[in-house]
Amino acid sequence: MPTKKSVLAFITPQIDSSSTQERLALVLATCTCVTCSAPLQQQHRLGMRESKSESCLVHSDPCGVAAGLAGAEGVCAGAERGRWRRAAQRVLAILGDNRFLSRALQGGDDAGEDTHAMLGGSRSASCMASGVRVLAVDGGGVKGIASIRMLRALEEQCGRRLCEVFDLVVGTSNICASSWLEGAGAIYAENQALRWISDIAGLPAEAGGVFVSGGTAGNLSALVAARHDWREAYPEFSSQRGLIISSRGAHASVAQAAQVMDADLIQSGGHQLTGDDVAATIAELGPADRARLFAVACTAGTTNLGIIDDMQVIGEICAQEKLWFHVDGAYGGAALAAPSTRPLFDGIERADSFIVDPHKWLFAPFDCCALIYADPAKARKAHRQHGDYLEVFYDGTWNPSDYAHHLSRRARGLPFWFSLAVHGTKAYADAVETTLDCAREAAAMIEAHPNLELVTEQRLSICVFRRIGWAPEDYKQWSDALLERGDGLVTPTKHEGETVLRFCIVNPRTNRDDIQLILDTL
């Protein structure tokens, strides 16, 4: 990513209040990485290729700031908390300083009371009734309850509501991450996280993109870029409706994107899209429709069943036919991080665009979808907005507003980067493997249960199963009762018109006992 200006020029914090200076002394101490001690001055591109350790995201110190939090030793004491403290320091350096941020971090005056009032309680109020046990077993569903348990664990370790503090830091700073000029530090950090995703997908070194709200926005923006690329190559079709191929198991947002774009969609094959399906569909098109075809949208882990399309062969066909190859990995793309499932995604390295939602299976808060292009210049041509007041931003620097259907945006990828910086990428691989192991164990437990049977093969972290003899209303009554007792959140779904149950295990703290607790009620 080209940058004409030094990152340091943008994100060196300005400390002007005496109270902040006393409590929050951010000192520009070095231009070396706090993790691996390597020089950072030239590390302005997204990437982690020169990392010397798992926890260093080349480098996880985005601006070379090794900052100290005055008076914070009691809060973050202990070697096991050092990584959190260093990452927090980098966040502070990124965001600079303002009075709301400093109040939140200091915890003094009325900051704490304001926070609790905002959350609808007092310091002594419990976020969840004592003894209630709720497990969210859904890849895109309610995670707030599980987050409360994580918050409490962090509270016990660090003596502060650290996650709340971080969200306050990000939120109250109100940083605009539309352009490099406005939010260089935050954008740099987001790009590091995008680089990690690009690397595990095998995308080229020049790949890059932006964090958008979710998979729906990601799919739409990617397909808009695909259509623009097609029309640029074939100007005679500038007024023609485009044509897209996807599987019948593709997420509903692909069809919605086609509708919004006024394009046509052919849903080929079954729940999985194979190379033969794509080849046959193309062969059946007449000359006029073949000329309109500009993209194939694959799915790397369908939302309902976890099915991965045949990306290896489909990618080859797209290259031969000069079609845009888009991969929707909103849910399943996280499994790229796990060595046991990485081979299932062979072919994804051919993708022209790829999305994955860290707010699903990569443990980030809503809303956060990584949209990555193999050649970002093509996306920039499609999405860059032009206006007299905008031209100041177009000086060769990296502007996230150029890579999706948006202009104003917050740094929604920053919490994800923060987690990566704290825990390291190996911790992510281990966490995904843990959920995969739990899903495999859950499938075995379902198969051994006298009243249950798997409906489809267990794929990724998804198990779809039926309760023998139940009607649709039985599933709803059971699900409602399970939630009412606080035992779990397991909602019914449909497969081939039949009402069934579905586990999508994305929390590495979910274990065999949790699954058994739920299965014992069936």
Image (spheres, rainbow, N blue to C red):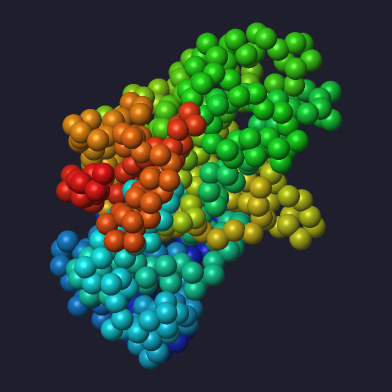
Q: Is residue 59 left or right of residue 410?
A: left
Front position in the image: 169 or 477: 477
> For the point 49% across and 69% down, which residue is it?
171
Residue 184: x %, y % from top left: 53, 58
The image quadrant that residue 414 belongs to is: bottom left
> For the point 41% across and 49% down, which residue is it?
476
Q: Is residue 297 left or right of residue 102?
A: right
The image quadrant that residue 290 belongs to is: top right
Residue 238: x %, y % from top left: 82, 29
Residue 8: x %, y % from top left: 47, 62
**In the image as oriented, which residue stretches furthest toward the bottom?**
109
Q: Is residue 343 left or right of residue 298?
A: left
Residue 268 vertical placement versus 139 (above, below): above
Front position in the image: 509 or 222: 509
Residue 55 visible in the picture: no
> For the point 38% across and 55% down, which residue is it?
480
Front position in the image: 24 or 224: 224
Residue 24 vertical placement versus 407 (above, below): below
Front position in the image: 260 or 97: 260
Check the picture and name the quadrant holding the C terminus: top left
Residue 127 visible in the picture: yes
